[in-house]
Amino acid sequence: MSEFRFPAYRKLSNNKSFYRIDDERTFFEIQVIGNKYFLIQTEAKQYPEIIRITDMLSFSEPFLESTVEEFHLYYIKSFGK
């Protein structure tokens, strides 16, 4: 996976989760549930988590490209600012 530039930004096609992928094993996710925002950091140690990062980077369904600006907008909301 080393051909990818990090950080990489992805989102779910339903705009309910936004991701910043820092490397092949680490990502941040902002989940949108109603009007609440949750920031989760994941260190991929198990196979399903590693495959999830691979799927995000490969734009497998349901992952789409996002931007640093879009991630930052929801990142700020996750802190209630």
Image (cartoon, rainbow, N blue to C red):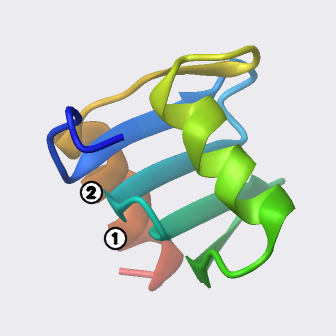
Q: Nearer the viewer, residue 58 or 76?
A: 58
**Mark 1 — residue?**
76
Query: In what quadrant of the picture does the C terminus appear?
Result: bottom left
Q: Is residue 35 visible?
A: no
Residue at the spot 46% in from the left edge and 35% down from the top edge: 10
As displayed, is residue 51 above or below residue 4? below
Would residue 40 be found to the left or right of residue 75 on screen? right
Q: Are marks 2 and 1 in contact (CB under 8 Å)?
A: yes
**Relative to 16, is 63 on the left or the right?**
left
Vertical position of residue 48 compared to residue 3: above or below: below
Occupied quadrant, residue 1: top left
What residue do we see at 26% from left, 56% from top?
A: 72
Please tell me which residue lies in front, 73 or 1.
Answer: 1
- Residue at label 2? 72
What's the residue type where badge 1 is placed?
A: Ile
At x 72%, y 40%, the residue is 16
Task: Determine whether the residue tagged by mark 2 lies in a helix, strand or loop.
Answer: helix
**Position of residue 59 in the picture relative to residue 7 (left or right):** right
Q: Quadrant of residue 61?
A: top right
Query: Of the residues shown, which amino acid type is indicated by label 2?
Result: His
Residue 33 is tagged as none
Residue 67 appears anywhere in the view: yes
In this view, 61 is above or below 16: above
- The local crowd at label 2, few if under 14, some if 14 to 19, many if 20 or more residues have their Cα within 10 Å, is some
Horizontal relation, residue 4 to residue 15: left or right:
left
Residue 80 position in % (x across, y down): 47, 82
Residue at figure coordinates x 51%, y 21% from the top left: 58
Could you say which is closer to the camera, residue 30 or residue 47?
A: 47
Residue 4 placed where, x, y %? 23, 35
**At numbered mark 1, what does the secondary structure look like: helix, strand or loop?**
helix
